Amino acid sequence: MRNAGSPVMGADSHVKVWDFPTRVFHWTVVSLVLTSWITADQGFMKLHLWSGSILLVALIFRIAWGVIGSTTARFIDFIAPPRRVWSYLRALVTPDKPLYAGHNPAGGWMVVALVTLLSLQIATGLFANDGLKFNAPFATLVDSELSDRLTQLHGELFNFILLLVYFHVVAVFFYFWVKGENLIGPMLHGKKHRAHVPPDLNLRFTRSVIALALLTLSAGLVWWILRP
Amino acid sequence: MGKISAGVYFGCVAAATVAGFGVMMEFRPALAHSVREWVGLEKPPQVRSNSFYAMRVAPLLQEHCTACHGSGREKAELRLDSLAAVLRGSKHGAVIKPGDLEKSELFTRITLPASNDKFMPPDSKPPLSPDEVKVIKLWIAAGASGVQAVNAIKGAPPPVVQVKFTEIDEAAVLRQRAPLSSVVQQLQDRFPGIIAYESRGSADLELNAALMRTSFGDKELAALAPLQDHIVWADFSGTSISDASGAALAAMRHLRTLRLINTQVTDSTIQALTSAKELRSLTLVGTAVTEQCVAALRKTKIRVIR
């Protein structure tokens, strides 16, 4: 499924590291987590359900994209053994800066943790109720006591999501101010300066049409799961 | 390399985190209370056992709210099972603003129209009665205190008295009725519908001879002599009894209510009733009993209706 073309290594000072679907996924998750937070806080539960459902589509897409997507999107590319994570963290406090095109070893586990937590968050949310008139699609399939417990867990899990987001943001600004590397820009336009990527870079990008097909399948699956 | 050192950066992060917590506590009063209590800057509110809160408000919250807002369930992260928790509020903020009903979400919720999605208690749970709402209203308006004495807040509706019915010991009742049960049965058969037990738990009898009108007279009353010690309520209105029944009536020593409307009895019968020590109500409308006799009765505990 990979692009059969040559690895992307332009002659200019920047090199493409993030594909379009991964970038869209990232900012979609940012906006949906924020939307879900606000809608739950303000009691707009129908919007909250929509927000959570779209997030579920995005997560299913991302998990699949992590298997068949571009090099930097693949789990196999960024899930590192603990020893490598520890070495990476130790190197961070030295003047040296380990170079990674995509997620660094710690960031890779952050992705895993966030995807896992968000999945749990959505799973519990599907059985939740707001104690008033709103019941999530699966809330009536279990007794009210279990639904209440899952609702409580749903609320508590969100604190852990916020904690991960906090660490993520602290790490991003650590890179910006301490390591002198802007991680936000590449997540917007997809390119990193050559100075911040390994010299022997060999990335391959999966075609966006594959991503579109995968997204359609994900949306269809979510519609099938949540159909009335 | 970057613009600042790792040490400076993490120092700034720590400062920003503390400031962030400070800001968050502004929006999360429940968290703010918990943190202040935890670091000892705030003491949990004091509650006295004779306070308006303990005696009037807490039982209402217990009855209507704590199933969903208690130790078992904490919907909206709100608990209403202690004054500290009530004042701490929910994840959306304070639910009580002492002295300010308009800004007290709890009061707003219980006074919304029942059709409103935010009405509490939700679903088909019984709403607070107007008196219960008034108790909450008075408490918040008076400052939502845990120490203000129960009688310090004026205008509160009286508390609902819990009435507990004792279980009837049917075996004991049967034992009490046993000595006369066959006689009662016989007389009930002879005079259908006019003899009944006073209650399910009693061996005392009520006699409603008025139902037989003039077909009930002195002879019929004499036939009821075996029951005389057990009759506590008797109505002879419109019957044909006369002073000849004076002795039979006087023999009903446990009689509490006697109605003699439109009968032929006179002062002699009434004077014979002095042995009915438990008699409290006597109705003599339409009789020939004299005012002089009634005046004498009015000096006793008997309430005479004439």
Image (tube, rainbow, N blue to C red):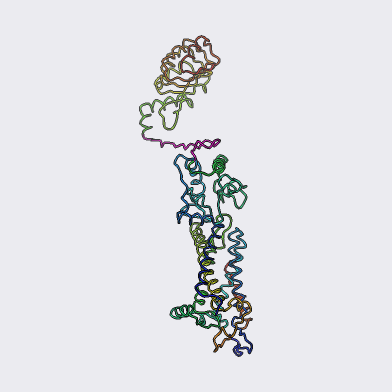
Asked if residue B154 is among those painted magenta in the image, a careful observer would answer: yes
Magenta span of residues: B148-171
Q: Nearer the viewer, residue B281 or B182?
A: B281
Q: Nearer the viewer, residue B193 or B201?
A: B201
Q: Which of the 4 quarters of the picture holds residue B197?
A: top left
Rendered position, B203 above or below B119: above
Asked if residue B188 is among those painted magenta in the image, a careful observer would answer: no
Main SS category, magenta section: loop
Q: Quadrant of the N terminus of chain A?
A: bottom right
Residue A13 left/right relative to A150: right
Res B188 seen here: yes
Rendered position, A79 above or below B80: below
x, y percent for residue B298: 49, 14
Q: Nearer the viewer, residue B47 or A122?
A: B47
Q: Which of the 4 quarters of the picture holds residue B276?
A: top left
Q: Quadrant of the C terminus of chain A?
A: bottom right
x, y percent for residue B82: 47, 48
Q: Nearer the viewer, residue B51 or B247?
A: B51
Q: How many marks?
A: 0
x, y percent for residue B214: 52, 18
Rendered position, B289 above or below A41: above
Rendered position, B140 above or below A223: above
Res A114 seen here: no
